[in-house]
């Protein structure tokens, strides 16, 4: 697939962080990356190896490394089968890659990780201690969601990319993995900030008459209304993040991606994330029952991730009604004609109503990122950047 150079740094090498350059140098090579070259089997082997070893670590330290919110829902038989499957897949793909490819390090790494996972007890590590609620890191949630999101989005991006030369290891891919980590490891804090207001405060703040009237409507109508209320709120706060200088410093982080894919959607400053979520959830709590709000949270995660993906095909008749990747990509361009356009995240006609709609026929942007603003390259530099400037 793609060009003849893998782990390619496109242009701005200074922007990439040092660790990423090292990873690229150790694992990358300049052989072709099409199917049958051992490239994809190597990548899959290393990926499954990391997940398998991470899962075995979770089995050894469940109290510390698994989230109490999720533990109760795990069918452990199935989870153990999944871990076993990851180990086997890492070895099989690793072997295939080592046979097919001149540079063996990718396939060997995957096999080594799988071997380490097996030697450390593999899928059958018993959980002896009784688990109780308490502070924990959501390593399980990070591994599981990484696997899920990769399975859902990556095949589309690999098979039908909008930018075939981009590749999955584009510039700053590792930085975005760190962003993904940063929202998954503290799951107790994030679920407290998101799910608690969504599910519990509805009963406190909900207006009984409105809630009763809402309950009369069919589920689908309630759901669509919830998306509408959420997107109107999102439009307002998103536009504010673009036009108020203090807020823009936070939102600039999300706009700093020079190439978009599903993972780039996770690059967002914590303050940006929390403020936007609160702004969306508060109006929803007045009118919608908690199951609708939870359903919306699933929908927004899937849809917002989708709109960032490097995926070209589109359902033409649906484009005016529901935002497609090409539409949100125009929001991320550094081209003058589309700056401060396309603020909605679900319904493009909201932008039409407020005069911020930009969607040229069939065209994709040529350049992404911040036009003339330089922000730090690393995660912590970006975290402190808005505060530093806001003196
Ligand atoms: Zn924006
Ligand atoms: Zn975005």
Image: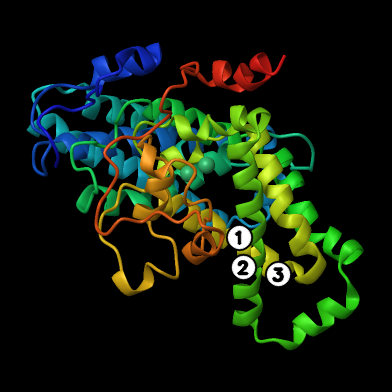
Q: Nearer the viewer, residue 346 or 357?
A: 357
8 lies left or right of 14: left
x%, y% of residue 376?
A: 50, 16
Judging by the rendered image, the residue that carries numbered circle 2 is 228
Is the CB of the residue bearing disc 1 within 8 angstroms of ligand 1? no
Q: Position of residue 30 (x, y in %)?
A: 11, 23
- Judging depth in this view, the residue of 306 and 190 nearest the camera is 306
Marks 2 & 1, CB-CB < 8 Å contact = yes
- Seen at 58% across and 31% down, the residue is 182
Give the CA separation, mark 1 to mark 3. Answer: 18 Å
10 Å crowding of disc 3: few (<14), some (14-19), many (20+): few
Q: Element under label 3?
A: helix
N-term-proximal mark, 3 vs 2? 2
Q: Which mark is residue 291?
A: 3
- Distance of label 3 from label 2 (alpha carbons): 16 Å
Picture quarter containing residue 60?
top right
Note whether residue 201 is visible: yes
Placement of 306 over or under 115, stated as above or below: below
Q: Residues within 10 Å of mark 1 (few under 14, many from 20)?
A: many
Q: Kindly indicate the quadrant of the structure image that contains residue 48.
A: top left
Q: Position of residue 281 (x, y in %)?
A: 73, 56
**From where the camera sits, is residue 125 visible?**
no
If you read the primary sequence from the N terminus, does the residue marked by circle 1 or circle 3 appear first?
1
Q: Quadrant location of the C terminus? A: top right
Label 2 CA crowd tier, 10 Å (few <14, some 14–19, many 20+): some
Which residue is label 1 attached to? 231
- Horizontal side, residue 93 vs residue 147: left or right: left
- Rendered position, 388 above or below 314: above
Question: Residue at point 60% right, 54% down?
Answer: 235
Q: State the residue at coordinates (74%, 63%).
A: 284
């Amino acid at each position: 697939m793609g060009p003849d150079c893998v782990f390619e740094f496109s242009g701005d090498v200074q922007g990439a962080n040092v660790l990423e350059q090292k990873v690229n140098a150790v694992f990358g090579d300049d052989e072709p990356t099409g199917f049958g070259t051992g490239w994809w089997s190597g990548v899959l082997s290393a990926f499954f190896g990391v997940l398998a070893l991470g899962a075995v670590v979770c089995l050894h330290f469940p109290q510390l490394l698994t989230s109490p919110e999720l533990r109760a829902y795990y069918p452990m038989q199935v989870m153990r089968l999944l871990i076993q499957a990851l180990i086997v897949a890492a070895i099989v793909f690793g072997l295939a890659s080592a046979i097919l490819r001149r540079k063996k390090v990718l396939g060997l790494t995957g096999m080594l990780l799988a071997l380490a996972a097996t030697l450390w007890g593999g899928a059958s590590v018993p959980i002896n201690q009784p688990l109780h609620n308490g502070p924990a890191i959501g390593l399980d949630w990070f591994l599981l969601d990484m696997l899920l999101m990769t399975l859902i989005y990556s095949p589309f991006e690999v098979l039908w990319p909008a930018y075939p030369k981009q590749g999955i290891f584009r510039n700053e891919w590792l930085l975005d993995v760190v962003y993904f980590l940063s929202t998954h490891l503290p799951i107790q804090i994030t679920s407290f900030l998101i799910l608690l207001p969504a599910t519990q405060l509805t009963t406190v703040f909900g207006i009984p008459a409105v809630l009763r009237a809402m309950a009369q409507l069919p589920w689908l109508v309630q759901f669509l209304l919830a998306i509408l209320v959420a997107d109107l709120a999102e439009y307002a706060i998103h536009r504010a993040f673009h036009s108020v200088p203090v807020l823009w410093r936070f939102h600039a982080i999300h706009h700093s991606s020079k190439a978009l894919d599903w993972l780039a959607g996770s690059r967002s400053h914590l303050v940006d994330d929390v403020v936007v979520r609160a702004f969306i959830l508060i109006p929803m709590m007045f009118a919608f029952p908690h199951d609708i709000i939870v359903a919306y949270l699933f929908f927004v995660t899937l849809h917002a991730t989708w709109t960032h993906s490097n995926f070209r095909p589109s359902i033409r008749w649906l484009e005016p009604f529901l935002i497609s990747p090409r539409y949100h990509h125009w929001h991320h361009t550094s081209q003058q004609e589309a700056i401060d356009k396309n603020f909605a995240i679900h319904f493009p006609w909201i932008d039409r109503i407020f005069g911020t709609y930009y969607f040229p026929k069939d065209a994709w942007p040529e350049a992404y990122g911040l036009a003339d603003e330089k922000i730090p390259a690393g995660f912590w530099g970006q975290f402190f950047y808005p505060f530093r400037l806001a003196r």
